[in-house]
Image (cartoon, rainbow, N blue to C red):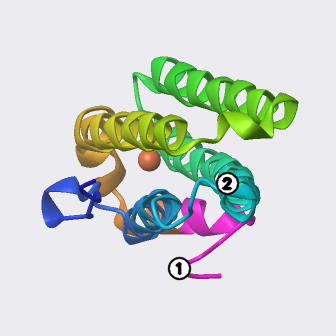
Amino acid sequence: MASIEWTHKMSVGVPELDNDHKGLLAVINQLEAHGADEAGQVAVRRSLNWLLRYAQTHFAREQAVLTQCKYPQLSEHIDEHRDFVNWMKETIAAFDESPARATAETRDDLITYLENWWRHHILVEDRKYKSCAQENPTQSSRAAREVRGYDIWWG
Ligand SMILES: [Fe+2]
Ligand SMILES: [Fe+2]
């Protein structure tokens, strides 16, 4: 299965948010390393938990930047984030109900979904706010850094 790599055309113009995106894609790519045996199921479950918490931190950070630059489509963007969080919570609950569902096939479907969601979200939805966030780069970076949480790339 192909992994999803961050490239410059994914840049949203705010280094802190680009770093979050790189970290999120790295977590998704790591899911592929887990096998379908019991140890793999536990590892997938742990990675999903980490991905959810990291995504929630990232969304809060992004929404802080969009609030400070008065992004006109903020409420629609928040809806997209909320839908993803709800989907992740449902997926994790389904895994907890039946860990054996974490077969190689289920895991591959899950990874494909995550790759497609994030590719679309970063390239299409997030890049819509690029010019807004770049109007005042210093304030955008400051707003992003004020939200503390689960960090991989910087802390
Ligand atoms: Fe977003
Ligand atoms: Fe984002």
Residue 142 shown left or right of residue 138 in the figure: right
| Label disc, if present, on residue 89 of the rendered structure | none
Quick check: 95 above or below 52? Answer: above
- Say which label, 1 or 2, has the lower sequence index: 2
Q: Residue at x 47, y 26 (%)?
A: 77
Q: Which region of the structure is painted magenta?
A: 142-155
* Residue of label 2: 57
Q: Residue at x 64, y 72 (%)?
A: 151
**In the foreground, 89 or 101:** 101
Farthest residue in the right direction? 97
Quick check: 151 above or below 77? Answer: below
Q: Position of residue 44 (x, y in %)?
A: 65, 55
Q: Amino acid at mark 1?
A: Trp
Farthest residue in the left direction? 9
Q: Amino acid at mark 2?
A: Thr
| Label disc, if present, on residue 153 of the rendered structure | 1
